[in-house]
Amino acid sequence: MAIFSLMLKEVRPVLPKPSTPLEKVLPREIAYADDVDFVAFQDIDIEEVGKVLEKYNLQVNVDKTEFTNLSRGETNWQTTKKVGTLIGDQEDIERRKQLSSAALVKLRKVVVVVVVVVVVVVVVVVAVVVVVVAEVVIVVVVIVVLVAVVVVVVIVLILVVAAAAAAAVVVVVVKVVVA
């Protein structure tokens, strides 16, 4: 963290100087972990910032660099992501709903694969038991136990999918309540 602070100290001189009373009281940068937001009322020369960072073997990730203009009538700030959350509430809720739906689709695919594997294993075990054990009573008991195991596994997987869906809804509800 000390190196990060030192680097920020060297970046400050290449940022535009505060020229209004409001600029003088605003923080010049907002840092979280390895991300930094520079705050200025004029354009920031990102190339100059990059030159300072090169001294520390760091570079500006141009693909992740965003310039957000906050002014009356502008709405592009609503789709700016900060610490994994979009600044606009409605935009963030929509994004989180899309992410949870995608996760649920992936989870369903996993459930289907697990059920198919369990059924195949049960069939193989039953076939082996039938071949090895000739007595009908033992075969029937083994089949009933194996079917019960399959039913329990399917019920557990259904509960996992339901829990994932409920968690996605809770995230959206919490976001709406907080907003």
Image (cartoon, rainbow, N blue to C red):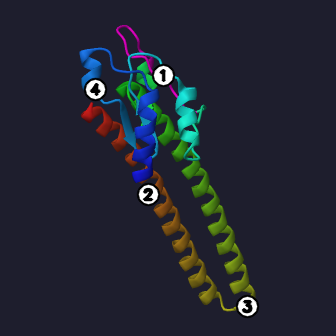
Label 2 element class:
helix
CA–CA distance in space, label 4 to label 3: 80 Å
Q: Residue 25 carries which label?
A: none
Image location of residue 116, percent across then percent down: 65, 62
CA neighbours of label 2 inside 10 A, class few (<14), some (14 to 19), many (20+): few
**Mark 4: which amino acid?**
Leu
For the stretch drawn in magenta, the main secondary structure is loop
Label 4 element class:
loop
Q: Residue drawn 45% across and 35% down?
A: 11
Label 1 element class:
loop
Q: Nearer the viewer, residue 107 or 140?
A: 107
Q: Nearer the viewer, residue 46 or 48?
A: 48
Q: Which mark is residue 132?
A: 3
Task: Say whether marks 1 and 2 touch (CB < 8 Å).
Answer: no
Nearest to viewer (mark 1 / mark 3): 1
Q: What residue span does the magenta drawing correspond to?
A: 64-76
Nearest to viewer (mark 4 / mark 2): 4
Left or right: residue 92 compared with residue 106: left
Q: Residue drawn 54% across and 79% down?
A: 145
- In the rendered view, would you say 3 is above or below 115? above
CA–CA distance in space, label 3 to label 2: 36 Å
**Mark 1: which amino acid?**
Ile
CA–CA distance in space, label 4 to label 1: 16 Å
Image location of residue 9, percent across then percent down: 40, 39
The residue that disc 1 covers is: 44
